[in-house]
Amino acid sequence: MDWFIVPGVLVDITKYFNISDSIAGLLQTVFILCFLVSAPFFGYLGDRYNRKVILSAGIVLWSGVTLGSSFITESYSWMFFVSRGFVGFGTASYSTIAPTIIADLFEKDQRTWMLSVFYIFIPVGSGLGYVLASSVTQIAGHWHWAFRITPCMGVVAVALLILLVPNPTQDAAEGHGGQSITSTTQGADKKPGAQSTARTTWCDDVKSLSKNRSFIWSSLGVTAMAFVTGALGLWVPLFLDRAQVVHDLVPPCLQEPCKSPNSLIFGGITIATGIVGVITGAAVARRYKKINTKADPLICAVGMFSSAPFLYLSIMLAARSIVATYIFIALGEFFLALNWAVVADILLYVVVPKRQSTAVALQIFVSHLLGDAGSPYLTGVVLRTKATFQLKMISRMKREGATASFPFA
């Protein structure tokens, strides 16, 4: 939810701070860069120290900064960018360590289902971020109030984490996850029990993971998915707002708060397709693995290849039909969601438990560095460049006495 509050009120934020599309794209880029840079640090700590303490500290940090960012005035826009960086730093601790705790507590099919429950809340939380941001802004009359709700939830999360979640040692989990999708797992990662009593350095862990082809290729797949979801997550509500203006369904927003249902609708689509997609991916993987050991990567491949044409059509049809755009966005998000739990399960059973936090951290680093760290900003640059080009063409044609229609100028 904290990740996607900003996209949910991006129109209001750009008006409030008076920033362009390309600068607005940097909000997500700053967040992701801090997130990915700090992930290896937390991966190192998670493999060696108390994971519950690290998780609790991360939640307190990002919740406190989120609350603080709600008091930033329009003359200090740079502070808002800095606050998003600190939110990324805090969430890196959670994203890196939380899946490994689940891996320690469960094994085989049970672990797959528990990871599915966990990863369902990525799209659910994302969707609720849009819904919360849009709803609270409309009720309270200012987007700042949207950043004052989730910190309260963070306090509850820390209390539940301390009281209810056990802190199993990595040694107790060495026997978990002894299955492998292919014969490509190499070196120390090939046998879960290997080096279970040895304390390795971070460089040794990275060297071993670099030889694990299953880990390398699945990480590249996650990178491609992150690139797509990063651009979608930030820009789709704003894109739909502008499409509706073109269709004369809503007037242009000239003053905040901007009243638009698109954040609510996109949030609802993300929640629904996320739940159905994650459950479907886990269920199909569980059944298909009984007859094909490569079931997991095949499901991920089908999900990625299937989502691409639907997302393309959603963009191309926006100038003709908003309803068609919603339908194809939903289909594209559904196929993307097939991957969430499955790709996490792949990592956890091709990497020994003593290296899992480091492996998750490296996957986060690579996927966000080459994925959604740059895609929101690049999309903003493309939008600004296209708009500038179209405005120049309109001006030129007016001088020549011609008329033209550019739906997304």
Image (spheres, grey):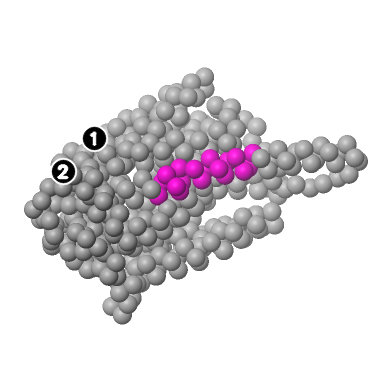
Q: Please tell me whether residue 368 belongs to the stretch shown in magenta.
A: yes
Amino acid type of the residue tagged 2 in the rendering: Arg
Q: Which residues are magenta?
A: 367-384
Q: Quadrant of residue 283?
A: bottom left
Residue plotted at (77% across, 38% down): 392
The kind of secondary structure element at disc 1 is helix
- Please give the label number shown on residue 306: none
* Residue type beneath disc 1: Ala
Crowding near the residue tagged with mark 2, few <14, some 14–19, many ≥20 C-alpha atoms within 10 Å:
some
Label 1 CA crowd tier, 10 Å (few <14, some 14–19, many 20+): some
Q: Position of residue 190 (x, y in %)?
A: 21, 64
| Residue 129 visible, this angle | no
**Could you say which is closer to the camera, residue 381 or residue 232?**
381
Nearer the observer, 282 or 358: 358
338 to 44, vertically: above or below: below
Disc number for residue 57: 1
Picture quarter with the N terminus: top left
* Residue 70 belongs to magenta span: no
Which residue position holds label 2?
48
- Name the image quarter holding residue 215: bottom left
The residue that appears at 48% across and 50% down in the rendered structure is 227
Determine which quarter of the picture holds residue 87.
Answer: top left
Is residue 281 visible in the rendered image? The answer is yes
